[in-house]
Amino acid sequence: SAARNGTKQTTSMILLNVRSGKMLHSFQCLSNSDGIITTLEQSPAVDTVAVGTSTGSAHLINTLHDVELFSLHHKGKQISKKSRPDNAVSSISFRTDGNATRQGVAPLAVGCDDGSVSVWDLTPVEDDNDGTTRRTLLTQMEATHHGGVSKLQYLPGEPLLLSTGMASNSVLLHVFDAPDHSGRILRQRKGHTSPPRLLRYLHPGVGGGGILANASDGTDAASCQILSCGGPGDLSLRLFSTARTNLDKEYSQGPGLERKAKKLGLVGPEGRAELLLPEVAGLATSEARSRDWGDLVTIHKDHAMAYVWSTKRGSQTGPVLRQPQWNVSAMKKRPPRTAHATSVAISACGNFALVGTVGGVVYKYNIQSGIPRGSFPRDAASLTEEEERRRKKGIKVAGDVGRTMRMLEKNSMKGGVMPSDVDQAERDRISFMEAEEKRKAIIQRASHEGAVVGIAIDSLNKTVVTVGADSKLVLWNFVTHMPNKKSPIMLPSPATKLTHVRDSDLAAIAMRDFGVAVFDCSSLSIVRYFGGSRYASPDAMRLSHTGPISDMGFGPDGRKLFTSSLDGTIRVWDVPTGLCVDWMSFASPPTSMALSPTGEFLA
């Protein structure tokens, strides 16, 4: 406890009888100490306890004689003028194994709120200069836990130290087997430091749900692996296994990040985050060519480029998917904001990745080489930022050959008769320019005027379906990059998300009116509506979501559609009948969900 005496804060400690509830003694040895008591730990020696305070001191107290034996002080690094150098002691633990006794040391581990762990040797050493005794600092492990150390505990009779963090969501097991008494991490379990933003099962079948494996028949547990992307403040991409926890890991974003951070003077997890990619905004996987090259593509928040990962290696190993004119270096001019990625999809063959952008353009890349393979609409990848702005607004560019040819044709065709001096080559050129103008008009009408929020590719690589914030659903030819004659299809409300199942070739589109439209990629038409503004009757509106839809997912057979919403519910829709067949409510709104390939589990 702590009491204020004027402006000074004094520390006090009392001894209580737990059974009777009476106070037996009030200790006076800590009356001159500053700060408050933050932790207590009983030592292996009788009548001796370790007391940690908020000023960074660890006092060894003899409770029998009410005497302070000695104190250990911890000072933090002065990172800024506002940061205080003192570190509050959050946990203390004594080591009791025989190896320490044989080596002639008595280790004491002290954890502080800056995430560091200090290991002291309690064996007294006499100073040759003044004859006083002091204690030796054996090792100090900095930035062990982000946000501070919550608890330290030496395992009985073992040189193993278990530590947990306040905000790091991690458990670390350190082993002290080096001659210099330094520690290293032997085992660790880590999770996200903020609520996950996106969940997806790893490789949900080549056809969208064809893995014939479950946890009951003892088959391959690959269908039990979940990819999880961290939320705000957490830049990690992790893999969790629901069958074996020792398969959990964080995907690597480059070798030696810890070493590079220390070399650049970036301390702790905040410094390491400076070298990581931005927050993951979307991902797509494909098992078709996972043995040959990368099988995972991610896009990131406020970032134009996409990155290829290998789930087999657990790291970002593939090429960076970008346009040739985009600079990779952060020191040079960055790509325009209209090029920031908003959606991603991988073809069924596993060779191509499609990345949608804020400006309404979808870029096509080869995953193996990273080379751009065109865009949707056609030739949009070669336009500059100014030319793209003019294309959207329909502004005529000075020196346009098509405009000049139309004026010449208009002047030469007065009276409706083609002059005799115009040869066949000239007529062919005029016809070509007319066809080119019609093609540009079709592309202009079908192109997105807002961000592309969802992309789907059919199982035969024939049709690409894109939906945007401009309420357009556009069908593109995968090979020619030209829009289908049915494009665009106007949705009742602007789209927010899209999910696709290749087995039944259905795509579910979430909209801003809290409804869902189901699009059949085979018949190229909308076949179902669930909720939203199209529900007019009160009974039907009762089944609709009352908040924005956060995620969607089809069952393995494509007959059931799961939708989660920020209204705190998950609803299950039967696609053939169009009815809501199940309803789940949660205390906190679900931000993402994923259905297992066998349909047994919902994450």
Image (cartoon, rainbow, N blue to C red):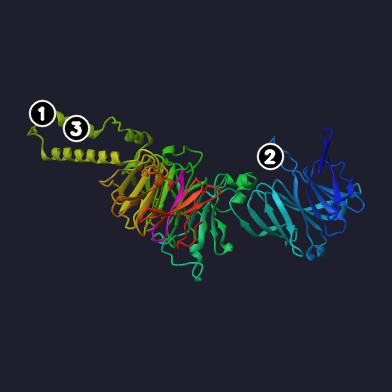
Task: Tell whether position 436 is magenta.
Answer: no
Q: Is residue 556 part of the magenta span, yes or no?
A: yes
Q: CA distance from mark 2 to mark 3?
A: 69 Å
Q: Is residue 460 above or below residue 221?
A: above
Q: Amino acid at mark 1?
A: Lys
Mark 1 — residue?
Answer: 414
Prevalent SS, magenta region = loop
Q: Residues within 10 Å of mark 3 (few under 14, many from 20)?
A: some
- Local SS, label 2: loop
Q: Are marks 1 and 3 in contact (CB under 8 Å)?
A: no
Counting the numbered discs, the total is 3
In the visual, does 384 lie left or right of 94? left
Residue occupied by mark 3: 406
For residue 299, side relative to residue 163 (left or right): left
The percent coordinates of residue 572 (x first, y second) are 44, 54
Q: CA distance from mark 1 to mark 2?
A: 81 Å
Percent position (x, y) of residue 154?
Answer: 75, 59
Amino acid type of the residue tagged 2 in the rendering: Ile
Residue 264 spot, x, y in % from top left: 62, 44
Pointer 2 residue: 79
Mark 3 residue type: Arg
Q: Earlier in the sequence, mark 2 or mark 3?
A: 2
Q: Residue at x 35, y 58 (%)?
A: 504
Tell me how far mark 1 sits from mark 3, CA to CA: 13 Å
Is residue 91 toward the left or the right of residue 285 in the image? Answer: right
**Mark 1 / mark 2, whichever is N-terminal:** 2
- The region drawn magenta spans 544-559
Q: Tell me the SS state at disc 3.
A: helix
Chain-order first, disc 1 or disc 3? 3
Which class describes the residues within 10 Å of circle 1: few (<14), some (14-19), or many (20+)? few
